[in-house]
């Protein structure tokens, strides 16, 4: 998911997507531990996507507090 897509989401949608993405990342990491994933760089991409979404959430909360 690109940054412009993340920015266009509402806060509630963003929270929901973060939960879904974290669950998928945890599942993918566990599956990779048991048997290697075909494309291990997808784990890194998913982790970075989660980080982008969490960063956007924190930006919104900080701007709301000011």
Image (cartoon, grey):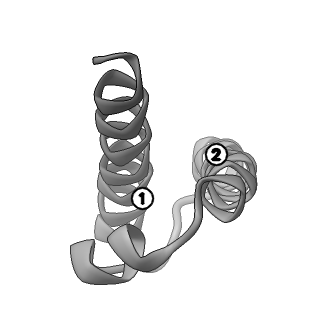
Q: Please provide percent x and percent y for residue 42.
A: 38, 70
Q: Which residue lies under the disc numbered 1?
A: 43
Residue 65 vs 10, above or below: the answer is above
Q: CA distance from mark 1 to mark 2?
A: 11 Å
58 left or right, relative to 4: right
Q: Please provide percent x and percent y for residue 31.
A: 70, 53
Query: Residue at image x 60%, y 51%?
Result: 25
Tell me how many marks there are: 2
Q: Which residue lies under the disc numbered 2?
A: 22
Q: Quadrant of the N terminus?
A: bottom left
16 left or right, relative to 62: right
Q: Please provide percent x and percent y for residue 8.
A: 41, 78
Q: Earlier in the sequence, mark 1 or mark 2?
A: 2
8 and 41: which is toward the camera: 8
Q: Please provide percent x and percent y for residue 61.
A: 43, 28
**Category of crowding for the residue at label 2, using alpha-carbon neighbours closer than 10 angstroms: few (below 14), some (14–19), many (at least 20):** some
């Amino acid at each position: 998911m690109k940054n412009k897509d993340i920015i266009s989401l509402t806060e509630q949608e963003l929270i929901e997507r973060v939960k879904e993405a974290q669950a998928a990342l945890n599942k993918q990491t566990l599956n990779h531990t048991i048997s290697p994933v075909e494309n291990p760089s997808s784990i890194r991409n998913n982790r970075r996507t989660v980080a982008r979404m969490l960063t956007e959430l924190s930006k919104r909360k900080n701007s709301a507090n000011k």
